[in-house]
Structures are given as structure tokens and as C-alpha cells.
Amino acid sequence: MFITPENISKSSVCVQCGRCSSGCPVAFESPHTPRKIIRFLQLGQVEMACRSPFLWFCAMCQACTVRCPQGVGVSEIMLSLRRLGIENGWITKDLWYYKIFTEMIEKKGKIDELRLGLAAAFHKGPLHPIEDALLLFKLWRRGKI
Ligand code: SF4
Ligand code: SF4
């Protein structure tokens, strides 16, 4: 499911009851809740919705979709917004990990742990070359990379 004018218009049936947010196991992690993300869409603020860190906390558990009395596919919308955010370059800087992760999956269909580990070491800054090298060595010894 992709965010299209039709999908956004489906969010218009949301009555903002908040049942999705009250059943969401990760809503407390972000200032935005599933209800608020749907509200952004209702207001035409698609970019704002895509930029919300909440999308990346979502565990795709489907609790919101099951609880919604209006039949809004909340979890599917979260997933679609992630993709839309990446495609449009709206993804925020601190979400680099997810960007690299999804790029790897899209290109190779699997994760390259060594590359992901090196990318993490360079992005997190400041660099801790000795600790990072030791961690990579331990992972390599255990056959994890
Ligand atoms: S449960 Fe459904 S109707 Fe209620 S706020 Fe969430 S999306 Fe809207
Ligand atoms: S699918 Fe995502 S938004 Fe919906 S309840 Fe689960 S974690 Fe929350």
C-alpha cells in the first residue's frame, strides 16, 4: 500500500478517537502517536507525517489497525510513510541507520553486518576506533560477521 490521494482520503474517516494510540506499545516513545500521524494526513501535512520519528518506533504489530473502529489501515499507512519519506529525502539525519538498513535490503535482500557496523561507527561520532575495532573483532571471532 502506498500513500496516494486515495489512501490519504481514507484517513479522513478517522474520528480521532485515539484507540490506535491507546493500544500502541510504542506510542510513549515519541511525541507523535498513531492518532497524530493520521491527523497530519487529514490536514494534508504528508511531509510532517513522514518526518515523524514515530514511524521508526512502530513495530508493525497491527494493534492499531485491529482496534480502529473506522477501519483505517493505520499500520500499513506507517509503513508507506516510511518509504515515502525515504523516497523524498525527508528522512531526518538521526535516522541514518534505517536508511542504510533499507538500502541494503533493497539492493541485496540481506544485511551486510560488517558494512552496517562500519557505517554505524562512522555515523555515531565521535569515533571510538579502538572500541569499535575490538567489537568488530569479537563479532568476527564469533562468526557474526
Ligand atoms: S483508532 Fe482509527 S478512528 Fe480512532 S484515532 Fe485511530 S485511526 Fe482514527
Ligand atoms: S502497528 Fe505500529 S502504530 Fe500500530 S499499534 Fe503497532 S507499533 Fe503502534
Image (spheres, grey):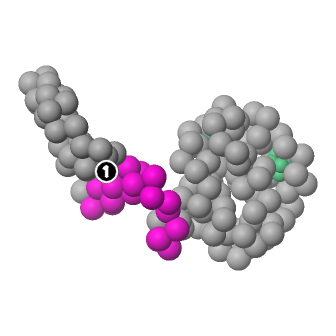
- The residue under the point 29% across, 44% down is 126
Quarter containing ligand 2?
Answer: top right
Name the spot of residue 5 as percent of width and height, x first.
Answer: 71, 76
Q: Is residue 60 above or below residue 47?
A: above
The kind of residue on which mark 1 rests is His
Name the spot of residue 112 as percent of width and height, x first.
Answer: 21, 46
| Image quarter hosting the C terminus | top left
Whether residue 77 is visible, yes or no, is yes
Prevailing SS of the magenta stretch: helix
- Left or right of 132? Residue 49 is right
- Left or right of 139? Residue 21 is right
Taking the magenta stretch, the answer to whether it contains residue 106 is yes
Where residue 25 sits, quadrant-wise, is top right
User: Which is more toward the observer, 37 or 19?
Assistant: 37
The residue carrying pointer 1 sits among few (fewer than 14), some (14 to 19) or many (20 or more) residues within 10 Å by Cα, namely: some
Taking the magenta stretch, the answer to whether it contains residue 83 is no
Q: What residue range appears in magenta?
A: 87-107
Which residue position is annotated with label 1?
123
- The residue under the point 66% across, 65% down is 48
Where residue 139 sits, quadrant-wise, is top left
- Left or right of 133? Residue 79 is right
Where residue 47 sits, quadrant-wise, is bottom right
Mark 1 sits near ligand 2, with its Cβ under 8 Å away: no
Whether residue 105 is visible, yes or no, is no
User: Which is more toward the observer, 134 or 111?
Assistant: 134
